[in-house]
Image (cartoon, rainbow, N blue to C red):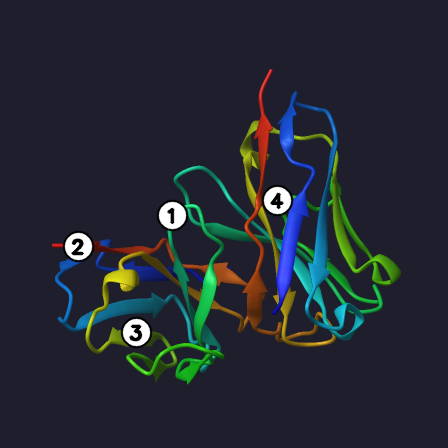
Amino acid sequence: EIVLTQSPATLSLSPGERATLSCRASQSVGSYLAWLQQKTGQAPRLLIYDASNRATGIPARFSGSGSGTDFTLTISSLEPEDFAVYFCQQRYNSYTFGQGTKLELK
Amino acid sequence: EVQLVESGGGLVQPGRSLRLSCTASGFTFDDYAMHWVRQAPGKGLEWVSGISWNSGSIRYADSVKGRFTISRDNAKNSLYLQMNSLRAEDMALYYCAKDSNLVVGTVPGVLDHWGQGTLVTVSS
């Protein structure tokens, strides 16, 4: 099983700041890495797929990068609605998910 | 707009059975594979099972193989998960998710839309 490790576990920032979230895979997943956003009581929402492609309707302030084992989700300028939990997920071999990064208001 | 609405969750005793349903709208259901993913309380996400558009390819996580059965009825735009011999570790919020692909292949598709989930509680 491919293990995804996210860091940090919690990130405390203010609106307008830049957020950088990391995801490391235990083995290469190529570019088959997605990022999901989950707000309390809501369904997960796909933000980025295949490392760097924004899903339909996702604002341009969200961007993804990386390949192989190291990936990054960047939110260029935080909006109030961006404070949530973010998961990375690979589809190179079945599906596995990271444990999540909680982006909280500072 | 794609909508996925799960139902059928509830409180069940260990060893008993439960059947979850997911009703889809806003897209051509039989053009896509579908999946179940679960999230235990306070834990991360775990893929459970996936089914191709025509039920021709079905896959399960090792943790549920032999106990859970995924199925679909394209005429009813519905996905199902029959869960037998339930254990405490099966307690979770179960999500229905749409695949970007037709089939559950060697490289799975993107899970591009998710439902709100239905809660399964396993307790005596």
Query: Which numbered marker is on residue B63?
Result: 4
**Residue at mark 3: chain:** A
Answer yes or no: do the residues labelled 3 and 2 have beta carbons within 8 Å? no
Instruction: Determine the CA span between mark 1 and mark 3.
Output: 20 Å
Q: Which residue is mark 1?
A: A40
Answer yes or no: do the residues labelled 4 and 3 have beta carbons within 8 Å? no
Q: Nearer the viewer, mark 4 or mark 3?
A: 3
**Residue at mark 4: chain:** B
Instruction: Determine the CA span between mark 4 and mark 2.
Output: 36 Å
Q: Amino acid at mark 3?
A: Leu
Q: Secondary structure at mark 2?
A: strand
Q: Secondary structure at mark 3?
A: strand
Q: Nearer the viewer, mark 1 or mark 3?
A: 1
- At horizontal 28% and vertical 79% (from top left) the residue drawn is A61
Q: Nearer the viewer, mark 4 or mark 2?
A: 2
Please tell me which of labels 3 and 2 falls first in the chain: 3
Label 1 environment density (alpha carbons within 10 Å; few <14, some 14–19, many ≥20): few
Q: Nearer the viewer, mark 3 or mark 2?
A: 2
Instruction: Determine the CA span between mark 1 and mark 2.
Output: 14 Å
**Vertical arrangement, residue B13 with respect to residue B54, above or below:** above
Q: Which residue is mark 2?
A: A105
Instruction: Determine the CA span between mark 3 and mark 2.
Output: 18 Å
Label 2 environment density (alpha carbons within 10 Å; few <14, some 14–19, many ≥20): some
